[in-house]
């Protein structure tokens, strides 16, 4: 195999990266060959009977090239089809030894390579990143004890409390089968019909209608593996655990209108965002938090602690941060790594185990089936991105695309020829064993009564929202339901959501032509501040600011502002009429990185408006005014250079910082960018 290295040659001592090195192939500067290595003399034309004649079948080079192309697509994931993967590293802050024997959670400071894939659920592989949707947040830890996969979503709860209806929920969510519409959207009859007729979905739907469903960036999104898992320590003592990924940049969202426009102007918005951030060295960091619950405390909630439609409020069980994951390397090849990575909720390590969470139980076989179907057989763990760092040994043999060559005569257990090897590892020496939970009961196809509380946390969530967040939820429901054709479904949905909040449901009903819902309002006082984005941290770091500029700017003024932005880690793009440079009044030049035509206001968090002169001043001013109007409408901060004051007035608008007569303009502008949105604008 060609040992030459790609862009990611292993310079950082990451052991997974080192393992991948042996598979990286560089083709630049090489001679073209067939897949069997035969160098060929012609790489332009098919072999023909005469230059204008028919193609001859014996052109095996053409045949192989065409055949490979004809078969180069594999089935996309049935859900989570659209996704994007990046490499990184997990570092432990705090030993979890008292709770779990998992090797990678023992030594503070120890590091474990990870691969993370972010995804959307509804749309196909070629859909858009910014759909209102569920986001997958799947992490593969390449530990010394084998791969550990922690699959999560950007919500802490699931849509169902029994896996039997998973297929129904996904069929209902996906484009309708008779017309394959809509793409990347749940705004259709089937989905809302499912919701109204499966009311355990209420809490999940509240999250899906909230700003959480429209992340500004995957770097600014929480991840929740949702289930109650079980830690087990060396002494065999178990502790229940819920995991959290908390982005150090805080949790931030797009507005619904921004997300919709971005879906058109840059469907790759989130993948571009994370890839660029990593290229610029602004590595996304997520802290791993745990909520721990002793076996004797499982009755502290007024809901079933195994119910996957409930989160454990952080105010009741605090989240302890035990480590951080830094995403610091882009993939070399999307297909080889991101498309072929195979996550599986049963990829466990000793010390972390299942519970009887009914959704978790239902997932334990499905991932293997889907990977086998997608990746063409059972040998997908041999694909480089899926290989564990430790070797594997067993008596499984053969199958499509078997790469390894097992040289032993023995392929069965028990045996005497190989002295009963490969054989089991006792638990004390690191062998995985299922937790010896006591189970008893009749075989029944039933759902426990304790899971039949559909609305209490949906109410808690609503009650925890800020007024702006509540307004957005109402708008989201009103948008989605307005796209539902059948009035009866719209009515059922508003009648259902009275159980969350009567005022909310009544406003939505009015917006979508339904009758005012009849049910009674259930008052609620409890709230969980942690679920509201109103309390999230804010930074200017790695936000995108566009400089709207033409010729004739004041060089020193503009350079100082751009320098300040860059010192604060802001990603600056210079936007003008044409690529090339703009020239200041002092003859200084600034490189233009985007044109008015090639970008859009929604792709930025803020603007620095400089203005300038142009051969077509009317057109130039029109573009600048459009950018300003959009940004203003989207509550974004703007900094106005001394040369641009005429574009915007009056000069006391919220979040608009003027340079004129302002000695602290640079700091004021950065503070405004940090704040991100100015909600009190009219
Ligand atoms: Fe799942 C993919 C997360 C419930 C069946 N799931 C998938 C992915 C994530 C999750 C992040 C994408 C992995 C990737 O990027 O390749 N799934 C979850 C979470 C769930 C959950 C957090 C509930 C708490 N899933 C769930 C259930 C079932 C499945 C109940 C079926 C019984 N999930 C699948 C799947 C997928 C999948 C069909 C599709 C593609 C894949 O597995 O690799 O097997």
Image (spheres, rainbow, N blue to C red):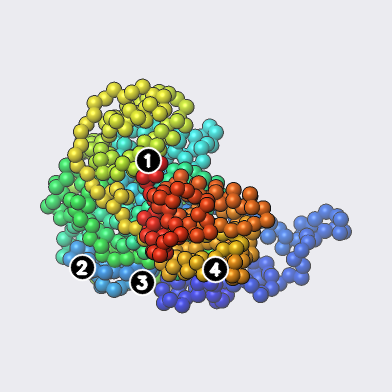
Looking at the image, tell me whether mark 2 or mark 1 is earlier in sequence order: 2
Q: Residues within 10 Å of mark 4 (few under 14, many from 20)?
A: some
Label 2 or label 1, whichever lies nearer to me, is: 1
As measured in the structure, the alpha-carbon distance from the residue carrying label 1 to the one carrying label 3 is 66 Å
Query: CB atoms at circles 2 and 1 under 8 Å apart?
Result: no
Residue under pointer 4: 555
- Residue visible at 33% across and 28% down in the picture: 506
Residue under pointer 1: 472
Looking at the image, tell me whether mark 4 or mark 2 is earlier in sequence order: 2
Residue under pointer 3: 418
Q: Is mark 1 within 8 Å of ligand 1?
A: no
Looking at the image, tell me whether mark 3 or mark 4 is earlier in sequence order: 3
Q: State the residue in front, 374 or 5.
A: 5
As measured in the structure, the alpha-carbon distance from the residue carrying label 3 to the one carrying label 2 is 36 Å
Question: Is label 3 in a helix, a strand or a loop?
Answer: loop
Relative to 298, does residue 420 appear above or below in the rendering?
below
Question: Is label 4 in a helix, a strand or a loop?
Answer: helix
Q: Residues within 10 Å of mark 2 (few under 14, many from 20)?
A: some
As measured in the structure, the alpha-carbon distance from the residue carrying label 3 to the one carrying label 4 is 79 Å
Quarter containing the N terminus: bottom right
Looking at the image, tell me whether mark 1 or mark 4 is earlier in sequence order: 1
Label 3 or label 4, whichever lies nearer to me, is: 4
Q: Residues within 10 Å of mark 3 (few under 14, many from 20)?
A: some
As measured in the structure, the alpha-carbon distance from the residue carrying label 4 to the one carrying label 2 is 58 Å
Residue under pointer 2: 97
Query: CB atoms at circles 3 and 2 under 8 Å apart?
Result: no
Q: Is mark 4 within 8 Å of ligand 1?
A: no
Looking at the image, tell me whether mark 1 or mark 3 is earlier in sequence order: 3
């Amino acid at each position: 195999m060609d040992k030459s290295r790609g862009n990611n040659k292993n310079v950082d001592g990451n052991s997974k990266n080192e393992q991948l090195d042996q598979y990286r192939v560089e083709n630049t500067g090489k001679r073209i060959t067939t897949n069997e290595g035969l160098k060929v003399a012609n790489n332009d034309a098919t072999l023909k009977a005469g230059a204008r004649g028919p193609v001859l079948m014996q052109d095996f080079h053409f045949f192989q090239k065409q055949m490979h192309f004809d078969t180069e697509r594999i089935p996309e994931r049935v859900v989570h089809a659209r996704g994007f993967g990046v490499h990184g590293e997990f570092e432990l802050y705090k030993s979890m030894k008292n709770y779990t024997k998992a090797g990678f959670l023992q030594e503070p400071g120890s590091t474990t390579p990870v691969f993370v894939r972010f995804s959307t659920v509804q749309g196909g592989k070629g859909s858009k990143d910014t759909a209102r949707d569920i986001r997958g947040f799947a992490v593969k830890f390449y530990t010394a004890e084998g791969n550990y996969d922690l699959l999560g979503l950007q919500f802490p709860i699931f849509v169902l409390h029994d896996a039997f209806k998973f297929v129904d929920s996904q069929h209902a969510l996906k484009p309708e089968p008779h017309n394959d519409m809509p793409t990347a959207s749940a705004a259709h009859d089937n989905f809302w019909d499912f919701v109204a007729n499966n009311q355990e979905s209420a809490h999940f739907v509240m999250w899906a209608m909230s700003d959480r469903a429209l992340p500004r960036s995957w770097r600014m999104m929480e991840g929740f593996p949702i289930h109650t898992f079980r830690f087990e320590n060396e002494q065999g003592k178990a502790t229940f655990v819920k995991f959290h990924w908390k982005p150090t940049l805080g949790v931030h969202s797009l507005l619904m209108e921004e997300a919709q426009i971005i879906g058109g102007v840059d469907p790759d918005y989130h993948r571009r965002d994370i890839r660029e951030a990593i290229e610029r060295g602004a590595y996304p960091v997520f802290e791993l938090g745990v909520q721990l619950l002793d076996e004797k405390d499982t009755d502290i909630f007024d809901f079933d602690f195994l119910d996957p439609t409930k989160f454990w409020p952080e105010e009741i069980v605090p989240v302890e941060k035990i480590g951080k994951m830094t995403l610091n390397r882009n993939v070399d090849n999307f297909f080889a790594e991101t498309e072929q990575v195979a996550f599986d909720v049963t990829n466990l390590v000793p010390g972390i185990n299942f519970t009887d969470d009914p959704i978790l139980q239902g997932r334990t076989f499905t991932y293997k089936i889907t990977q086998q179907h997608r990746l063409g057989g059972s040998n997908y763990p041999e694909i480089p991105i899926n290989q564990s760092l430790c070797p594997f040994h067993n008596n499984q043999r053969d199958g499509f695309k078997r790469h390894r060559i097992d040289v032993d005569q023995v392929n069965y257990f028990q045996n005497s020829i190989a002295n009963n090897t490969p054989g089991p590892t006792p638990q004390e020496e690191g062998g995985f064993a299922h937790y010896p939970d006591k189970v008893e009961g009749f075989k029944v196809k039933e759902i426990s009564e304790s899971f039949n509380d559909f609305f209490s946390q949906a109410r808690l969530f609503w009650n925890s929202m800020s007024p702006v967040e509540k307004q957005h939820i109402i708008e989201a429901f009103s948008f989605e339901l307005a796209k539902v054709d059948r009035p009866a479904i719209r009515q059922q949905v508003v009648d259902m959501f009275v159980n969350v909040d009567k005022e909310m449901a009544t406003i939505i009903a009015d917006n979508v032509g339904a009758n005012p819902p009849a049910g009674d309002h259930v008052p609620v006082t409890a709230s969980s501040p942690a679920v509201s984005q109103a309390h999230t941290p804010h930074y200017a770091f790695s936000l995108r600011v566009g400089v709207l500029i033409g010729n004739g700017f004041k060089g020193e003024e503009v350079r100082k502002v751009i320098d300040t932005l860059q010192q604060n880690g802001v990603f600056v793009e210079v936007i003008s009429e044409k690529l090339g440079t703009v020239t200041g009044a002092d003859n200084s030049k600034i490189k233009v990185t985007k044109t008015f035509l090639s970008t859009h206001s929604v792709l930025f968090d803020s603007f620095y408006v400089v203005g300038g002169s142009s051969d077509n001043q009317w057109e130039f001013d029109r573009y600048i005014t459009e950018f300003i109007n959009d940004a203003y409408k989207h509550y974004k901060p703007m900094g106005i250079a001394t040369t641009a004051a005429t574009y915007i007035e009056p000069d006391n608008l919220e979040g608009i910082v003027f340079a004129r007569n302002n000695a602290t303009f640079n700091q004021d502008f950065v503070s405004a960018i940090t704040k991100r949105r100015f909600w009190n604008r009219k």
